Amino acid sequence: MTKLWTLMTTVAVLGLCQPASAETIPAAGQTITTADARFAAPADWTLERADKIVRLIAPEGDLRMTLVDVGPAKDAAAAVAAAHALAEPGFARKLRLSTPMPAREGWDEIVNFDYETSPNEKRSIVATPYRAGASWLVLLGDGGWATFNKRSGAINTFFDSIRPAKYVKESFAGRVPHKLDPARIALIREFVADGMRQLGIPGAGVAFIQDGRIVDEGGIGVRELGKPEKVDANTRFMIASNTKGMTTLLLAKLVDQGKLRWDQPVADAYPAFRLGSDDVTKAIRIRHLVCACTGMPRQDLEWIMTGDLKTPASRVFDIMKTMQPTSKFGEVYQYSNILAAAAGMSPRISPIPRWKWVPATIARCGR
């Protein structure tokens, strides 16, 4: 979820003031190059080009992402102002928040600008200026929340692909890694601690693995700001969607044991499984619970905002009964916490209690 909300503050839609040529991106997608950048264009989106401007339009038509080659500018704010002047003269939205982001993938500076919208608009309007050397590229965005959610997979791919035009990714092929001796471990720990100080992170757990075994583990910092308890090797953290990989592993183990089949209808394994759409309920198989390809939306805010440690896992099935698809089965990648959570109910098929079965199974897989 975090990644989606971050993304909703990093993309936007704007009109072009110059005549533009338009084309539909082929199903396989393609790499697009501008004067200052290159990126992977999402398949089946519309691409429009004009002088210094490239605009991508989602198939729904209400979400657009516009890249503007600004060139030299005084700072990030000046670059965004120049981009608006080129792509949308008269832009007058009030800035709500600007957030510096870590430099990455060849960019020396990245800043997120988030603009005010009313709740009734149900849209996000943002700008993200990127600087490489003295030159700025600005990503402008404006789109409906529903389409942001539906197209999150394509948007993530696009967003993560934006690079300076001349950027060459560093290769580690043929390099021999250093051994993790005490001096190097101390150096890495200090690197992590420095990053934590810059980002205001109170504590972190760390582990160093070499040649298939843990050579050092422990913690850095404290568990909570203002309190003395330090992070150690046994401090528990919320690991969020990392559990999806574990869930998929556990499903695979049950398949290996003959207790499930990947092509088995979910309703056969979970009699309580029902979606708001009878057609999707009948079509969905065990493998689809973790594929994010069923056409079902996230629809997880109720679960996230109202649930706590005392909320029964069966609550997931209650929410699923109200879910309706927002795209065709297999049409797009749509992140789904609810369906992945339903997949996590699979260990109840085993006679071993889930809280014992999960760590024991993962431990066996690691041998």
Image: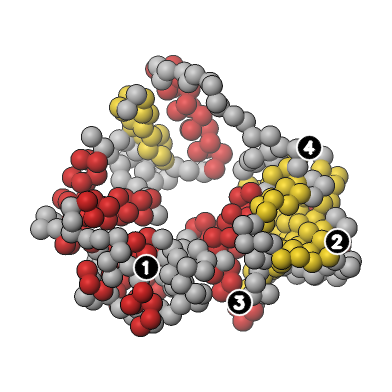
| Mark earlier in primary sequence (4, 1) | 4
Name the residue type under label 3.
Lys
Considering depth in this image, is 117 or 282 the residue closer to the camera? Answer: 282
Find disc 1 in the rendering and name its residue: 338
Q: Residue at x 41, y 61 (%)?
A: 291
Q: Position of residue 26 (x, y in %)?
A: 67, 61
Residue that appears at 37% across and 68% down = 338
Residue 270 sits in which quadrant? bottom left
- For the residue labelled by badge 4, is the local secondary structure a helix, a strand or a loop? loop
- Whether residue 105 is situated above or below residue 2 in the rendered picture: above
Left or right: where 53 falls relative to 333: right
Q: Residues within 10 Å of mark 3 (few under 14, many from 20)?
A: few
Label 4 packing within 10 angstroms: few (<14), some (14-19), many (20+):
few
The earlier-in-sequence mark between 3 and 2 is 2
The amino acid type of the residue labelled 1 equals Ile
Give the residue at x 71% y 66%. Answer: 24
Q: Secondary structure at mark 2?
A: strand
Mark-to-mark CA distance, 3 and 1: 23 Å
- Identified at 36% across, 74% down, the residue is 283
Q: Residue 59: give x, y in percent of width and height.
A: 65, 72
Give the residue number, with chain letter if any, for mark 2: 50
The residue pinned by badge 4 equals 133
Whichever of callouts 4 and 2 sits on the residue coming sooner in the sequence is 2
The 10 Å Cα crowd at callout 2, few under 14, some 14 to 19, many 20 or more, is: some
The answer to which of marks 3 and 1 sits earlier in the sequence is: 3
SS for dot 3: loop
Rounded to the nearest whole Å, what is the CA distance between mark 4 and mark 1?
43 Å
Residue 122 - label: 3
